[in-house]
Amino acid sequence: MPKRVVSGTVTSDKMSKTRRVEINRVVKHPKYKKYVRSRTICYVHDENNESGAGDRVEIIEAEPLSKLKRWRLVRVLEKSTDVDLAALRAARKASAEAEAMEATHAGEPDKA
């Protein structure tokens, strides 16, 4: 039987060499005939840590690598363009504080 190849979105990259990938799909309810959104969570082995959170990736079935990992990363289809707003705000605040310190020290005479 051939190995399945699917694509999904990386939702967590906090583990070393392991990614949590979410595969979203739409299925028709058998009784009510309404389309319902469903998802599958896969833990994927990423040897070189080349994917990050928000990336679209292609994964393939593999032999069991650990308790949860049953997939391997084939390739990164699309890198994420999301920006970490908390890190951006922290960097802006740090640069503003540095500029304020320079401005206050620029007006003082040197006491050396």
Image (cartoon, helix red, strand yellow):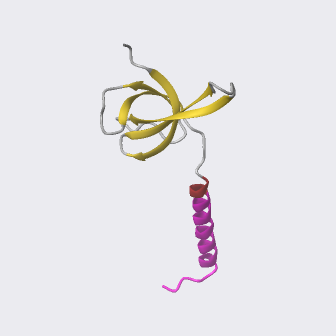
> In this view of the protein, can residue 56 be seen by the observer?
no
Residue at image point 60% right, 47% down: 83
As drawn, the residue found furthest toward the top would be 1
The relative height of residue 12 versus residue 107 in the rendered view (above or below) is: above
Give the quarter of the image for residue 88.
Answer: bottom right
Residue appearing at x 31%, y 27% in the figure = 63
In the current view of this chain or complex, which residue is farthest to the front?
A: 31
Q: Quadrant of the N terminus?
A: top left
**54 shown above or below 30:** below
Residue in the picture at 39% in, 46% down = 15
Residue 65, percent from left and from top:
30, 34
Total marks in image: 0
Name the foreground residue: 71 vs 85: 71
Res 112 visible? yes
Quarter of the view holding residue 32: top right
| Residue ranking furthest to the bottom | 111
Magenta stretch contains residue 5: no
Main SS of the magenta part reads helix
Image quadrant of residue 79? top right
Instruction: Verify whether residue 94 appears in magenta.
Output: yes
Q: Where is residue 10 in the image (x, y as percent from the top left)?
A: 50, 38
Q: What residue do we see at 59% from left, 78% from top?
A: 105
- Relative placement, left or right, of 18 versus 32 is left
**Residue 76, percent from left and from top:** 48, 29
- The residues colored magenta run 89-112
Left/right placement of residue 83 relative to residue 4 reads right
Q: In this view, does 109 lie above or below 48?
A: below
